[in-house]
Structures are given as structure tokens and as C-alpha cells.
Amino acid sequence: MAMPTSTRPKPLLEAEYCKGCLRCIDSCAKDCITQGEHVHPGTGMIPVILDLENCNGCQLCIQACPEPYGLRPQVVPESGSGEFELEDPASLFGPRASHLQEPVDHPGREVPISARQPLMLKGTYASAIGAILAGCRHVFGYPITPSTEGAELMAKILPKLDGAFVQAVSEVATVNMMYGCAGAGLPCMTFTSSPGFSLMLEGISYMIGAELPGVFVNIMRGGPGLGNIAPEQADIKLACRGLGHGNTQGIVLAPATPQEMLDLTRLAFDLSFRYRNPVVILGDGYLGQMAGVVRLPDTLTQPGLPAWAVWGDQEHRRNLISSILITEVDLEAHNIHLNAKYAEIEKQEQRAELYRCEDADIILVACNTPAGTAKGAVEAMRAEGMKVGLFRPITLWPFPIDAFKPLLSHAKRIVVVEASPGQLQDELRLALSKADLDHPPISSVQRYGGKLPEQVEIEARILKDFQLMKDARMMEEVKA
Amino acid sequence: MSVIYDHFERHSHGEGLKGRTTHYCPGCGHGLVHRDLAEVIEALGIQDQTVLVSPVGCSVFAYYYFDVGNTQAAHGRAPAVAIGHKRANPNSIVISYQGDGDLASIGLAETISTAQMGIPITVIFINNAIYGMTGGQLAPTTLMGQKTSTSPEGRTTDMGMPLRMAELIAQLDGPVYVERVALYDTKHRIKAKKAIEKALRIQVEGRGYSFIEILSECPTHLKMNPTETEAWVKECMEPVFPLGVKKDIVVEPWWDAAQTPNFDPDKVLAVMGADQEAPTRHAKGFPLHLGGQDISFKLAGSGGDGAQTAALLLARTAINEGFDATNIPSYGPESRGGTSYADVHIAEHEVLNPAAPNPMVLVAFNAPSLTKFAPTVREGGVIIYDSTVIEDLSTLPPLAPGIRMVGVPLTQLAMGLERPMVKNIVALGAIQAVTQVFPPETFLSTIRMVLKDKPALLPLNEAAFAAGLRHATLTPA
């Protein structure tokens, strides 16, 4: 009886790639496939046995095989015996996952902008404008007071610039949309406030693990829990010490004026791409709402596309965005790499403003709106002849300890002014301790629950500290 | 298959057999769907556009195999990540590949909300009625009575009944194509591949969101051999999860795959409302007569009195004169109904402390505001109040020495213009007249600047300012 001939190739099975699941057996109408009997020594599986005498090349067995290199079509040589020939192992196991060339960085560019009049903007708006100028055209967010105005402005502006504002179903979805957009290599951001920031922490950890840039503007409100919507600074610990699970750190910027909301938002995009790491901007509710003079920079940024992006084109096809490293040695190596990055950031990115600190006996330490109030107190005390200065950390992590260190030669008291129960002070103390620095006594002015420290409270504390200084001096004189 | 890597170098560094075999158990349905998906991507010619989002679940390592752009997402968040990719590059073809725990349990909110957005992405949903990666626990799609490691006596109703995702997604308005398919025999495998192809084609053509649910086999955790599992899917799963097209509507292509963001500086500045022309300055210098280089104001009323707008205009006026200014509104529940107030500072050089606990100038639009803030006004300060609504000053707490009290009938003057809402602009006129902080021309040019897009409102506001100014000038302190 003549066998039916077919032009379609018959199946080929390399036994080591067969897991013996047997799903192919039922698919074959010609009963060519039978259950194997012998364990394959290389795999411990029992591969099926093919007898292709009756095979008509229907290939349904191939379609039934879950393994990509299990059953597959025979490669029929163009000439020769028609028998299957073994492939060259070098071509069988290619050198790379993908044969494509390494992608390259496509740098962005700075586009000059003509001189403009200063704007009068509230903090959240200033931050949004800063992001636009930094080249951000993708904003994801979920409404939460008191940060929502930033998102609202973006929702208004971005469609006019062919960008997108996407209101996500939650902060959890927000941060993961950012993960996708950042994974594609584009600058993106969100505006949120304390409870929303808590929800984003998981995603921030993933972004840090996958080394993705992104800017998080957290307009801090009163907590814990739902708290209230008045200003507080009690997310400093979260941003500096708790960006989600695992070994995480991110640069934390603390603007004090609407102008700085713009400037530091621009800087945040630059830093987040430079280090491939999320950057957090912490503002207090007051700063988010406060309007002030905002001058525009000379240029705007047209972003490029980094080599590592998963853009969805041929050049970037071989890329992978992932935070999984399933093998312990790989994950340890990744953490060592991250630690080196964190160390570099600690070395390079400390920023602070020193206001009348040169000769100060008492150094106030404050950030955000309380720094403005503290500045007022410095001026008032200086007018009374007291040597008071303000040290304002602009980066909370890394804490600008290098700039603080020289002040220790003349400072007799340190007063930390904050709208939190000592979270800024903890950052200062940790930085002093890590740098092995002796320091004068530290006192504090703290308000919570939506209250900011008032200038009179700071002045009262300063007067008290001057008295303590005097007492200490007298004690020393008595001893002498 | 060119869309499957020649060598799985991401699978344990591609060492040994792992360079050519998947991490899936024998007989697992994932391998079949991978094959179909790879073949469809190749057939549609979209390999260089495709971004595959791997979930958390057994297919967490889908990126080991597909030679496309790959992103690995957090548990349940794959569709959100997919939206991020699609928004970043509208020309990319984005596939969210998810299992039942990922899609129907932890990621339910993302699943539903992205489906409803209707943005063209393709969701491939592998439903095998059990958790695989974590070791055989109850899934949202586990059948009633089915024993799992977290339903050892079988699923009961209090654990929730099986969730039919395809039906749920199909009744949303966002998706254009939803189908449930299976893999348990040749016929159904052919249908499954066709469904995947159609779903991706819909995305390629920019028609919208598509969702393919695939009933799949998990022999390991169902504790059956692969052939028995196929039978179980057919006999036990299919009656609960009926196969077929659940939604298929014709939508014309609408997605703009060519959209690229605009970075034209003139366009950017225009949308920000940044002006090129400097406003004319009218002041001779900083109003030092008000008591220093930094003057604080408080404007207080109830929500709707316009205190916030007046404060903003006052600060803007100072900026137009080349000085520094800040404005902080009070906000929150208190501002909706209770007293709403704003603190304004104007400074010759720099505002240091933006709060105004002891203002130099208070404008009170109602009695509670006057009672609350009048005692905070500093020595030698000014209080302007709406004498239409505040008649009795006898109950006021004691004030600091040297305070000038000026009553101006703000509401009445505004009513005279038949627009009570402009009483805040009347107040601005009164502030000018009483304090001489800046010349009237500066205030008027600020008002014109703010209303440049609403010129019809200009005459009314100019009249309101003039009314406040005129009345306050005539009012003895």
C-alpha cells in the first residue's frame, strides 16, 4: 500500500527536551507516538517515542507540545539523503538571548527658551511646571488632598503638549503605570500625599530594584492613618529610611519655596535618570498651597531615550526591565551594585543652604516651610544681637553632613525645628553618628498634627538655649 | 520560531538543559500558550513592536522565552504596567500575560479599570483554577468543592464562588473583544490560537482592548497526569467557565499610534501662561510707610467671599512691582463654610516667614473673621471690615494700640454693581485707598493681566475696584 506523501515536514524530537507529558499522544490520528519506557539519563524524564512510518506531517503533535524545543518540524536539507542531520551545536545554542546589537543611549537636548516674566505659582503648580520643563509628558496619579492641584494642572496642560495624564484606579496602580512608562525610558511623575505615598512604596521598591527613574512629589499631611489634610513633615522617616521592602534608598529633596518646587523638580528628573533611581520630593501641605514668585529657567529639556529602555522597537528588543534575580549570587551582586550607587549618591548629591551660619552660636536646622519660619526667627534674633544661623538641608537623604561639619567648630547649641516628632532630628543624629562627629546639645521645636512651628516658639527656644549656654559657661568659670 | 529565543540564557544563565527547556512542569498549559503567542507575534510581523509584561505567578519568567521587549511586573499590576508602556510609546504592542491569582485576585482593581479604559492592550489570562507558583492554594477561579492546600476540605461558598472573568470583563463598556478558549484538544488549541491572533490584530489596528481567557492545565497541583488534567478541564472547568466569544464589537481604529509629545518652547510657554512682556511699574518704591521691608496681610471671610482671589491679586501686584510676595490660603473642611483666610506677605527683598500670625493689615469680610483675627493685628496696624454685614463693634475683644479701623460697605458697593461676588475687588480698592501700599494703576494692571482671557469681565471689575477706592478714600478712620 502506497503511503500518502506530504510536503510538510514531519516532527523531530530531541529526547532531552521532552518532559514526557504525553499531551502529543492524543493529538496524533496515526498513532505514531507512544509513551516511553526508559528514563532519560540527562533529564530524569521519560520521553515519548516516535515512529514516523505512518506520519503524514499534520504537525498537530507539534501544536500539542508545551515545550518550544520539544516536538518541532524537521529541518529538511535542500539536497542529500532527506535524512535529518544534526545541527551545528554552535548555531543551536546561540551566543545571546537575542541576536540584536547592543542598544545605545540617544541623548536628550536642552532647548533654549526666550526670556519670560516671573510667574506667581502655588507650590504644586510650580512643581508641575518644573516637570514640564524637565521634559516630563507622562503623569499618573490618584487625587488626594493637598497635592491634587498638581495633577489637575497636568490634566489641563499635558493633552495640549501631546502627553498624557492618566488618573489611575489607585496609588498602587499609579506607581505601576509609572513603572511601565519609566521602563519604556520616559520621564514620568506623580503628585501624592502621605497616605497615597504609603500605598506607592511597594512599587517604589520594584522601581529601585529594576533601576527605574521616576519623580514622586509627596505633599505631606497630618498622620498617622487618615490623619488630616493640614501640613506635617512626618514622612521624612518613610522617605529616607523606608522606601518599601528590601535594600532601598532614594534621593529625597526638600524644597522651601515655590521657586524651589520648580527648580528641585527639574533637578529630580535629572538625578533620577542619572542614577536610574526614583527621587522623592517632600513638601509640606503649606508649601503645596503657598503661592510665590517663580522664575523660569533658560532652557527646557527634550528627553532622549536611554539604551536600557524597553521601548517596543527593534533596537531595544533585547532589553528587560525586572527586579527578579532568582539566584542568590546574582541578587547579592545586584545589592552590591545598588550599595555602590547609594554610596556615590551620598558622596555627590548632598545639598544644603547655610543662612548666616558663619559665626552662629546657635544653629537652627529646618526644612520646607518651617525653614522659612526659622529664617524669620534668625533675622529677629540677629536684630537683638544674638548669633543665630539656619542650616537648611535641601537633600534629606543623603543628609548634607559635609556642609554641616564645619559649623561644629563654633556652634554651641543645635535646635531642630520641624513639624514631626523628631524625624528630621533623627536624620541629623544618624548622619552625625555615621560621620563620627562630636556635637553640641540638640534641642527641638516640634509641632504635629497639622500645626507648623511658629516663629515665636522658635524664638522662645532660642532664648532658652542662650540661657543654657550662659549657664554652662558660668559653670565652667566656677569650675575654673 | 523566531520569537522564541534560540537559547534561554535568562533561565539559570542558560546552563545545560535549561538553555532549551522551559521552567514549566510537564504538561503545563503555559507552554502551549507561549507557542501560540510567539507564532502569532511572528505572523503579524510585530516582534519589533511588542512589549510583553510578565506577571507574578508561574509565568513570572515568560521573559526567559520571548524575543521581544520584556518587562516584569509586581503581583497583579501587569495591566497598569502595560498602560504605562502603551502611553509612553503608543506605537508599541503591549501584552499583559497573567494568571488567575494575579489577574482575578490581587490585581482585580487594575484588571477592571484598565479594561474599562479601553486603551488598546491585549490581556492573556491563564485560568487553571489554582495557584501554581506558591504551591496549589485556592484561586479566585477554583471550583466549588475543589480541594486546594488552603481549602483542604474543598471550596465552600464562604470562600467566595468561582469568578468568571471573561463574562465580567465582557459586560464592561471598554473592551472590544473578549473570548474564553481552552487547550484540552486539537480543535480547541486551534481556536485558542485564532483568538489570540484576533486579539492582537485588534490592538495592531488600534481598535481597542481585548481579553482572552484560556482554560489551562496545571497537572502538578491538580495532582493528575496531563491527560487526566485535560479531561478535568473539559468535564469540570468548562461547565463553570463556558467557552466562546463573550464580546465582539466593531470599533473603527481610533488609537493614535503616531502621537509624540511636543517640546516646542513657544508652545510649552504658551500653555503655562508665561508672559513675555514686563508689566509697567508705577510705584516709587517699597511701601516702607507700612512698617518695614516685609508687610503681612490677612484676608478673611467665609468660603465664597473671594478672600483667596483678592489675596492672590494683592501678591501678584507686589510681584508686578518687582518685589517678593507669598500667599498662603487656609484650606480644608474649615474653608468650606467656616472662616476662609489667606496670609499675604510682600517684601522688598525676600519673604522669610510666609505665615502671618500678626498681620499689619486685616481685611474682614464677616463678623466671625473680625472677632477671630482683629486681636492678632499688630500695633499701628489697619483693619478694613465690611460694614454692610458688621454693624456692631462693641463686642470686639481688645485690640493692640494704634490700630486704624475702617468700615467699608463692601457688600453694598458690590450690590450697587449688581454683582455681589465682586466685593473682593471692592475690598482691593479699599486696601489701596486705606494703605497706599501700591498705586491704583498697579492694581488695575494686575486685574487686567488676570482677566486677559476674559475681557468681558474687565469693566465690572474695574468699576468694583474704583468703588472701593472712592468710598474708602472718603471714609474717616
Image: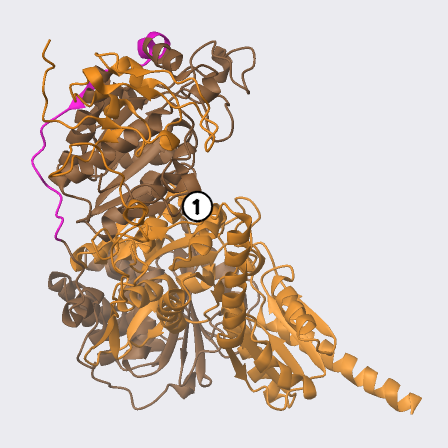
Chain colours: A orange, B brown
Q: Position of residue A375 (x, y in %)?
A: 54, 78
* Position of residue A447 in the picture relative to residue B434 (left or right): right
Q: In which quadrant of the rendered image does the C terminus of chain A lie? A: bottom right
Q: Is residue B96 left or right of residue A200?
A: left
Q: Look at the image and tell me whether residue A222 can be seen.
A: no
Q: Is residue A119 above or below residue B166?
A: below
Query: Which residues make up the magenta segment?
Result: B235-258
Magenta residue check for B270: no
Q: Residue furthest right?
A: A479
Tell how many labels: 1
Please, what is the three-letter code of the amino acid marked with disc 1?
Glu
Based on the picture, tell me whether residue B241 belongs to the magenta stretch: yes
On the image, the x and y values in percent for residue B393 come to 48, 61
**Within the image, what quadrant is residue B53 found in?**
top left
Task: Identify the residue at horizontal 52%, vertical 67% (top origin).
Answer: A340
Residue at left 48%, top 47%? A202
Farthest residue, direction front: A81
Q: Position of residue A132 (x, y in %)?
A: 27, 65
Q: In this view of the protein, which residue sits in the foreground, B6 or B99?
A: B6
Task: Name the quadrant of the N terminus of chain A.
Answer: top left
Q: Residues within 10 Å of mark 1 (few under 14, many from 20)?
A: few
Q: Which residue is mark 1?
A: B15
Query: Which of A316 and B453 lies nearest the eye of the viewer?
Result: A316
Rendered location of residue A201, percent (x, y): 48, 49
